[in-house]
Image (spheres, rainbow, N blue to C red):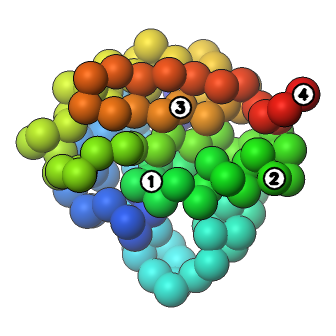
């Protein structure tokens, strides 16, 4: 089972959404400095074996530039990032790609679908 850390770029309400679907989750603001650099969030998530859930495309860029094998990242590409708008597509993508997320993956979710790239990117 995956565990998620919700980045500060997304509302804390996502924590309850993930819990409702059986995935433990925490909002970054509850465990770290909200002004922390993306690298710090990534390092914490890797140490804690958590998947980063974010709206910030920099996390995917960091994975690509560093060719890191983790942590896994789920990034949302949409204007409206509230759970009442995206819950179904995000939950569907996480369920579909949960095995890949456990191994190391970048999952990108937009309003219509999700896609996955295994880590490290570029290998």
Residue at the disc numbered 4: 123
User: Quick check: 109 left or right of 19?
Assistant: right
User: Quick check: 64 left or right of 116?
Assistant: right
Gap in Å between the C-alphas at discs 2 and 3?
Answer: 16 Å
Residue at the disc numbered 2: 65
Q: Is residue 122 above or below residue 11?
A: above
Gap in Å between the C-alphas at discs 1 and 2?
Answer: 18 Å
The label shown at residue 54 is 1
Q: Residue at x 53, y 78 (%)?
A: 32
Q: Position of residue 106 (x, y in %)?
A: 61, 35
Q: Earlier in the sequence, mark 2 or mark 3?
A: 2
Q: Residue at x 53, y 31 (%)?
A: 107
Determine whether label 1 and label 2 are within 8 Å by CB. no
The label shown at residue 107 is 3
Quarter holding the C terminus?
top right
Q: Secondary structure at mark 4?
A: loop
Of 78 and 83, nearer the camera is: 78
Dot 3: few (<14), some (14–19), or many (≥20) neighbours within 10 Å?
many
Of 26 and 38, nearer the camera is: 38
Q: Secondary structure at mark 3?
A: strand
Of badges 4 and 1, nearer the viewer stands 4
Q: Position of residue 16 (x, y in %)?
A: 23, 48
Of 31 and 76, nearer the camera is: 76
Q: Earlier in the sequence, mark 3 or mark 4?
A: 3
Q: Secondary structure at mark 2?
A: helix
């Amino acid at each position: 089972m995956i565990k998620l850390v919700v980045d500060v770029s997304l509302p804390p309400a996502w924590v309850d959404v993930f819990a409702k679907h059986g995935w433990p989750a925490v909002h970054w603001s509850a465990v770290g400095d909200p002004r922390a650099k993306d690298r710090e969030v990534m390092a914490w998530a890797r140490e804690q074996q958590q998947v980063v859930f974010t709206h910030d495309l920099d996390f995917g860029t960091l994975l690509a530039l560093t060719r890191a094998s983790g942590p896994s990242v789920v990034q949302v590409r949409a204007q409206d990032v509230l759970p009442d708008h995206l819950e179904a597509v995000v939950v569907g993508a996480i369920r579909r790609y949960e095995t890949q997320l456990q191994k190391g993956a970048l999952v990108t979710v937009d309003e219509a679908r999700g896609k996955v790239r295994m880590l490290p990117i570029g290998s």
